Amino acid sequence: MPLSASILPASPVLAPARKSSAQTVAAAQGSGSGSTSVSRLASGSSSSTLSASNSGAAPRAQRKLSSASTATVRGTDAKDKDKDKDGKGSGSGGGAEKLPYTKRSVPQLHKHNAESAPPTLMYWSRAPTWGTVPARNIRAHTATMVDHVAWFFGGCDEKECFRDVWCLDTETMEWTHPTMLGDIPDRCRAHTATLVDRKIVIFGGGAGHVYYNDLFVLDTSTRRWHRPTIPKDSPQPTPRRAHAAVLHRNRLIVFGGGNGTKALNDVWALDVSGPMEEWSWSEVRTHGKKPSPRGYHTANLVGDVMVIAGGSDGKASYHDIWCLNLDSNTWSAVSTDRTYRRLAHTSTQVGSYLFLMGGHDGGKYVNDLLLFNLVSLQYEARPTRGRTPTQRGYHTTVLADGRLFVFGGFNGHEVFDDCYILDLAGAAYLPQVTSFSINVE
């Protein structure tokens, strides 16, 4: 099936599996909510502070102390009630019996070989959203975080494409459908949306058999759309969709996609350093062996390196990972012990990991979560619990305040409008590296 067709239906040592009881108790102490900041994880240029919740796995000695104290108090209360019946109970003055001192109420320090408590797991749940929820199911849309608000644009259902903008406040969980001003883009899907300052830059995409190479800019402060004009005689990418883009040093870097006839593997850069009327495109001449042409892949900027994962040429689903050093413009392939074929998935940076969610493996849609270690450049297995999203691809994922939000998507039969949250408290137990660089050349 050509890529031009409609959306395909088609190391460092691991963190210990267990933490000691002392460590668990230490992590559980702090604020009145029973949680404390344990790790600061970054996604792109932003960062989130994660918390490890007090799961109730206190040392046995503390549980014994609690039960013993409770039993003693209950016994004393019973005696006081009996005395009250006889008229001998204590008033506000003296006469009340002191709590008996027993050996059971003496705190017992746990031994060095005591059984340790398990670490907190990453937990899935359905997002409790409210407000003006999207009026339609959506796939192949985009989601962009601006402060604590996720801005969703475009996409399609089983019948048509859209050009609506929807906003989800990740703090209040409220959906809104703001009225937009200016030069609103045409209906489109499989475009890219990249944050530049507080503006969202939309490039490419398409609707039906039409492909675009237009640029649109949404100013989230004024809710006004702008359309930069690029001279027709200047270099610019061919129309495309299913590409990927990142922002690097005031340059919007675009890789791959499909143009309606074939899959692509070219690289373009849009200079966004000046005012919109001065923006210009240039093709990036790269060195080394290139990735094969593809679309529906993901791209993440890690330092000065763009990391490409998966994708498809319309026939095969890829499992490879590539790195493009944007200083030297050199491609390098990454060799991994395990491989996972993926297209139409999402990839979100959480500290020194990429979280790859869902997608299509070439045979079916999946809902598993893959963690790619950006230091060892290897996949790691990590368990999750809770209500996992159903199998899907063409969804969106954003990171906000230590939570991964997944919205919409398609499973080959149904387009979704649901929203799920992955609480990353368990990610605090990952061996995070706060300063690192990728070097695969």
Image (tube, rainbow, N blue to C red):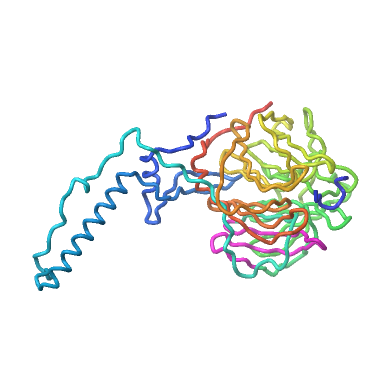
Residue 145 located left or right of residue 67: right
Whether residue 94 is situated above or below residue 288 in the rendered picture: below
Q: Residue at x 63, y 35 (%)?
A: 379
Q: Which of the pair 158/200 is nearer the observer?
A: 158
Horizontal arrangement in the rendering, residue 183 relative to residue 380 (left or right): right
- Percent x, y for residue 292? 81, 35
Residue 186 seen anywhere in this rendered image of the structure: no
Image position, residue 56 (x, y; %)? 40, 50
**Percent of width and height locating residue 356:** 65, 43
Nearest to the observer: residue 141 or residue 382: 382
Residue under the point 30% across and 47% down: 62
Magenta-colored span: 147-176
Query: How many labels sit on residues?
Result: 0
Is residue 302 visible in the rendered image? The answer is yes
Q: Quadrant of residue 370?
A: top right
Quarter where residue 337 is shown? top right
Find the residue positioned furthest to the right.
261
